[in-house]
Image (cartoon, coloured by chain):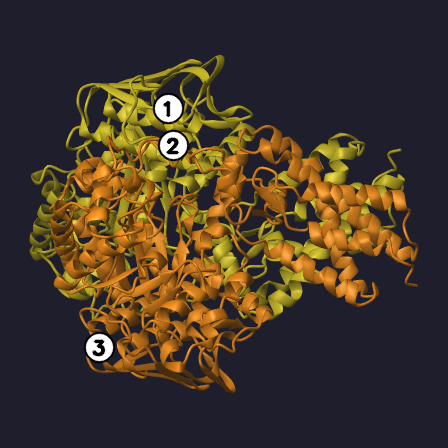
Chain colours: A yellow, B orange
Amino acid sequence: MPMPASVQQGRGMLPVTQSFSVSVTGAHDPALEAGVQRFVAQLSRHTGIPFPAKAGATATLTVRAEKGLDAVLKLGDDESYQLTVTSSSAELTAPTTLGALHGLQTFLQLVTITSSGFAVPAVTIIDQPRFPWRGMLIDVSRHFIPIDVLKRNLDGMAAVKMNVLHWHLSDDQGFRVESKTFPKLAGMGSEGHYYTQAEVRDFISYAHDRGIRVVPEFDTPGHSRSWFVGYPELASGEGPFTVENENGPSSVTDPTREETYKFMDKFVEEMGKLFPDAYFHIGGDEVDGKFWDSNPKIQAFKQAHGMKTNQDLQAYYNQRLQKILAKHHKIMIGWDEILHPDLPKTIVVQSWRGQESLAAAAKQGYSGLLSYGYYLDLMWPAARHYAIEPLSGGAAGLTPEQQKLILGGESCQWSEWVTPENIDSHIWPRNAVIAERLWSPQTVTDVNSMYTRMYAVSLQLESLGLKHNSARDRMLQRMAGTAEINSLRVLADVVEPVKDYSRWDDSKGPIDFHAPLNRMIDAVYPESERAREFSAQVQQFVQSGYRDQAAEARIRNWLTLWRDNDATLHPLLQQSALLQENIPVSQNLAMLGAAGLQALDYLDKGQAEPDLWKTQQLAVVEQAKNPVAGLLLMVVAPVQQLVEAAGKAPHQ
Amino acid sequence: MPMPASVQQGRGMLPVTQSFSVSVTGAHDPALEAGVQRFVAQLSRHTGIPFPAKAGATATLTVRAEKGLDAVLKLGDDESYQLTVTSSSAELTAPTTLGALHGLQTFLQLVTITSSGFAVPAVTIIDQPRFPWRGMLIDVSRHFIPIDVLKRNLDGMAAVKMNVLHWHLSDDQGFRVESKTFPKLAGMGSEGHYYTQAEVRDFISYAHDRGIRVVPEFDTPGHSRSWFVGYPELASGEGPFTVENENGPSSVTDPTREETYKFMDKFVEEMGKLFPDAYFHIGGDEVDGKFWDSNPKIQAFKQAHGMKTNQDLQAYYNQRLQKILAKHHKIMIGWDEILHPDLPKTIVVQSWRGQESLAAAAKQGYSGLLSYGYYLDLMWPAARHYAIEPLSGGAAGLTPEQQKLILGGESCQWSEWVTPENIDSHIWPRNAVIAERLWSPQTVTDVNSMYTRMYAVSLQLESLGLKHNSARDRMLQRMAGTAEINSLRVLADVVEPVKDYSRWDDSKGPIDFHAPLNRMIDAVYPESERAREFSAQVQQFVQSGYRDQAAEARIRNWLTLWRDNDATLHPLLQQSALLQENIPVSQNLAMLGAAGLQALDYLDKGQAEPDLWKTQQLAVVEQAKNPVAGLLLMVVAPVQQLVEAAGKAPHQ
């Protein structure tokens, strides 16, 4: 994952034993040498085999790249590669180191344990990406995410061939990068958590070595309260400003003062050097016009310049900003709202609104990126992200030339509800299927295959150092105060956090970004594999006309486990302040288990159950649909299906 | 754990909420400030609560140390502290920062989740160590262990108040520290894995900040083949030498050449500066005399100097070496074999032989450390280590003055069978009970309490960053090639690696130190908690006269799980080359489960079972006792007990 553009199966397997070694030919490139060393280390972790530091005389895998990595990676760099594996050796060739790095990751994914040892199936792969821009946004403003956590996520991105880290570095809640020109930006605009410039340079270099561009975002003129803590003169409204007080004055930048542009000029000059990428993201989303409306000077400015709407004023701001960016050799990128005919066609529009919005931009000649449908923080199942096709909807009708303007997309990890501890599990493994959507041919859409491969990759990602699985157990153990969490796992395995913005809606009032995120809702996976599998088993049983006894036995096992689990779990939930809120969830699961088992009994007997029973059970089902403690019980629907089936005519 | 010297329970609990903060008074000491910051970070990880970087106005916990850490820690530094927790605040006072650091760890262990949140029970603790030297040896020669793995083990040591890291830096298989004076020591005496001097300094500083001394060991004149690869002139026998070839010439240092002492003088001068601790370990164990016997020049030297035995020659060598150490202000420490009346009373003898050996040294006025009984690599259960009392056996009869010469002890992690991946699980949590033996009063001996507290500490150690639990799952998943390892865990939970030196004996021929350690035997815990609990349940059932139905139900559950597990597990074992060797283990477990269930049936019926049945089942039991793939099934004994009980007279 992502599925290569072309795969041709061969015969036999290439064994991966302790004598495995890699040789590199072609252009000498330190980045490729380092990439091969990382690959060997990763292969060691994957297999538990300590490969010798020095390669043997005859290499198992030869790697050849014609051209090394440039000092600065560019959009559209050749990322293709060809990998040929036979039962005796393997060959990886690529026009550039970028492609070779991708090919190494493909090889790593192919290494599996067999009955005769680790091996790679013989295969010929010819591969290149469908879209040149395959990114992930990480918001480090709402919750600060330390560099080491970001680095392991870069490793994960490289494993699934994503090539852009979009670093959302500033927002109302924090300005996260050191500015030497304007030290009060991070100095006052954060609670002390920000990246030094040395850390930023090290991080960019780390990303570069993995073929990943780093695009910084400094959101403006909205979402910029953190700027104003140290520099209130930039704001349209009155201060004093603080990053901590969600009820305090929020504001947007004042686009009418010349000093604002002098500030931005110096700022872009400094940050433009720190971040070598050609693209510079200025945000531009969700500008709250009321701060402009309530400022008489800004109103006067609009009138004097013949601007009718705040959109016009923002376009004016963006035009001025774009000229500053151009002066410092940067290409502007921003969210949907920046789209305005007065801006040059060089800019890129990132769409959180959808394919229609992208299509509209493309028709006007603007490049675009899709992020709508790729918001990882909304807790959607992987399949729903997977179904989001950039060239569908409004974009399907574009001409081939216009379609080329759709550069790709970006998943987004907004960080209102994550900490360094659980961010991995909010990103992985679901992010891998977005990576596949953006890399693989449009025809690759099989959902079952996707899930199988996603969970295989998930395992590999943990061995790379990501903690999306292991962190859950640690958090559950903390809540329980013991390592004996089997019954808690049973519950955790079948729940998911509420979807979309429900958690915001439920939180009543502004979010406290410093509150602990140590509840069950923070620990569980966004998608329940167990519930998906159980649901599939129920489908299979139903489709067999209730005759598939193996499926029924499996269903009974799960239902029995769930029915009986609360007896063990309840005392554990009771004694922990962090777990008490989940008591009704566990009870609902027990009732669902009992209802499902009774339904199966009726189905087995071939009798329709009494109406009263059905009414009662459906009431149980309905109640279990309500989220409790922000958790959804994901086995409600299949149990409901069994209960309703048992109400139909006898089938035997 | 370790249990404090004095604990007095109070009333109520001190809540640990987000407003928790710490203030430091007393002598300003950066090490204490850093220690408090680490403590707050650890408390955050333990609770999931992000405590503010800046403490609030009124501190929950006040910490006061009269005296800061010295630049170099010394044996016998005051480590005492007093901790008072009430329902509204906590106070920690100590004569030195060392004691305060220990007190913070005690506080951390007291934080538990309750039904009203995290809290610490009100308590007054007055605590100091029983022995001043509480160490752990880590051998980094046989398998190189990277600094980050060692650092997390230092964190673990600090958590259980151990205060000496004994760094076994050289042995036949590798010389692991850079020498600028003799660059070929690590340069040729390792396969490229060694610590630079900068890394060593950083590591010592990391340990110092945690109140841990670092004592280096350079084993000589035996166990020193790695020295000879670059400097063959030091050896008594002929080269060429290599660290890799276990069948090649091993050798011991030639103590008859003056050049040897010139070399050692320069070497000790350099390493003595790099390692600031007052103690310098010269090994001195297991010198193979045949290399001296077969060298005519050495024989002539012995004769000329009137030496009768090789022990005399080694004593001569040690005397010369001791003078070199003294010149460079170092105190010599070595294994049992260095003990010789010609050496000054300042030296310290570390005993792998036992308390008798220590007592003999103490009677001659020599200080000593116990390591006999504390070898973690022998895979003993925690209780067996826990029972090893330094002042027992021969040492029990010492005078109080002589007993004071017993400075403490050291656990030993010899690294023939560990890698960076699984070393944590070979050390933890068992090492915590050795720490308790050396810290807590001699009267603290309750084994059940020990196990309860050991597993509580174990959980906390994982949250510090140790991987003794999480690594097992990752290794099992690797072997299985899937994340679905429930049935494999069932098996892993009831097996232990073979004990003592059985694995060496089974390996037939020299160990290949570069072979993969990725088998089941490498992944499982040294001690099975499940088997210990199961055994306790069977005892309870037997002692109840087979009438305790709750115990019987639990026993039945486990036996049923084990009986049925092989059906699921067998296909998984079959398809993996790494797991196939465990097929008979899984089958044995299934047969034990079946035998145990049948025995319970007979017991329930109150009938003695037929003789033939019993004979058959005891044959199954006997077979299951044999180690397979280096694994012992730890539930054999309790199942045997059930089978034999069922053969006795009816009990109803």
Disc 2 marks a residue whose amino acid type is: Leu
In the image: residue A576, left or right of residue A549: left
Image point (19%, 73%), residue name: B70
Q: Which residue is mark 1?
A: A20
Q: Nearer the viewer, residue B300 or A84?
A: B300
Q: In the rendered image, which residue does mark 3 sit on?
A: B68
Across and down, in percent, residue B103 comes to: 37, 76
Q: CA distance from mark 3 to mark 1?
A: 53 Å
Q: CA distance from mark 3 to mark 2?
A: 46 Å
Q: From the viewer's perspective, is A385 left or right of B134?
A: right
Residue B109 placement (x, y as % from top left) = 45, 71
Instruction: Return the chain for callout 2.
Output: A
Label 3 SS: loop
Please give the name of the residue rendered at 53% of the width and 75% of the height, measured from the top-left corner. B116
Q: Residues within 10 Å of mark 1 (few under 14, many from 20)?
A: some
Query: Is any atom of residue A571 visible in this view?
Result: yes
Instruction: Give B543 or B558, whichever is nearer the viewer.
Output: B543
In the rendered structure, find residue A43 and report the number of the disc placed on it: 2
Q: Amino acid at mark 3?
A: Gly
Do discs 1 and 2 share a chain?
yes
